[in-house]
Amino acid sequence: MLIVTLDGFTPSALSCFGSSWNRTPAIDAMAMGGTTWDRTVCHQLDPSIRFTDWLSKWRLSPDQVSFVTDDGSIASLDAANAFSEIVLIDEPIESVAATMEETRLAQLFAVAMASADTSNCVWIHSRFLLEAWDAPRTLFAIETFHDLDDAEPGFVDEDQESGVSTADADWQPMPPWFDEMTPPQLAIDEHSHPDLLATWMRTYGCQIRLVDELIGVASRWAQGERGDVVVLAGGRGFALGQKGFIGGQSAEGSSLLSVPVIASVGTGLRVPHLTGLDSFPSILDLAARFDGSLTGSNADVAMAQRFPSLDEHPTSDGPESWAEPTTDAPWVLAMEGLTPVGLHTPEWFFQPGADALYLKPDDVHDINNVARLRPEEVSRFRDYCNQFATDGNEASDRGDEGWL
């Protein structure tokens, strides 16, 4: 089994999740021939706590797993010592790579595929989407959008929400993408260039197309030659203009918490109900059952039984309870360390710091805050988050983090 997890990985840049501005054919093919979790949300933004939580729940013995990463904080965890092998590639990235093979992520994939000869399972984890965008910019073909170099200065963008035209502001044309490697952490307002967001989106799109190319190579290798299952998932999301922000570190709202999860088991199944990323070990356990053994309709049946339809309201309390239908709707509380940063229910997303409330899944980008219309829900969700914040701080004082 090949597992790939990426921090800073947003579903809004994947065409199988509805992206109209970026194309990811290899990931789309994986989704078409596998199972996609449509509403997966991060439960813990701190990667060290998240990985410790995952490894404590995973039934597959870590001593059967080779772990390849560029994240030294994960490689140095006590829980990570259980892996049969840890390969850390964290040399500084000096510049944008000229070819795909020269990128950090390609190096991780190459080492992982070599390690698969001696391991039943290989796990690749990377933070490059949050730290260094070294993918060749040519991965986003320039013919896929208008050549801005030929644009006349002062053109009017009728879709600009601020109402400020480029003619009034005398904007200069933006480049098709940015060459700098450091991912942005910036706010967008009425004074920002009207094409600033689009340029950063294309730059991020280059990184996602690198992921797509490598997933395509790895999928052909793993499934074609070995019959292995491939699981692709995000650890935390990335804001691409949602709530007026671009970035994966300081962003707020559900865009920071929404992540894709896709497994190459099944034949195009979509899991529509809300799923917390704390259940990722359960997904891995299930995928391991089909590794090199079951495919097609048998896998579809097993997936459907393990992850019932939305109408049956499966619970997200823990891996053992997923197999049984329940009348309790799942709630997923997202934490950053010991601080609640978001609460998802099937119908709502509550942002504790702002007391903001958004209808889900309709309000995808947290645009319409309806807190003033539903004060009873705000009060209920606020009390719930405060309870966990209090319990978490008390647990931390005792040195007990079992509440995670």
Image: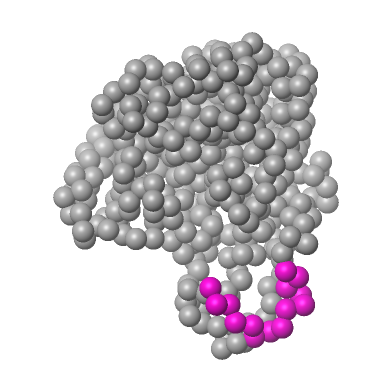
Above or below: residue 100 compared with residue 72? below
Task: Identify which residue is drawn at 34% across, 31% down.
Answer: 311
Q: Position of residue 228 (x, y in %)?
A: 68, 19
User: Quadrant location of residue 365?
Assistant: bottom left
Above or below: residue 190 compared with residue 363? below
Task: Identify which residue is drawn at 46% across, 50% down.
Answer: 255
Q: Position of residue 268 (x, y in %)?
A: 58, 30
Does the image show residue 247?
yes
Judged left or right of residue 66, residue 342 is left
Query: Which segment did they paint magenta?
Result: 146-159
Judged left or right of residue 345, residue 129 is right
Q: Position of residue 361 (x, y in %)?
A: 39, 47
Above or below: residue 124 compared with residue 81? below
Task: Identify which residue is drawn at 61% across, 19% down.
Answer: 296
Q: 163 or 45: nearer the eye? A: 163
Q: Quadrant of the N terminus?
A: top right
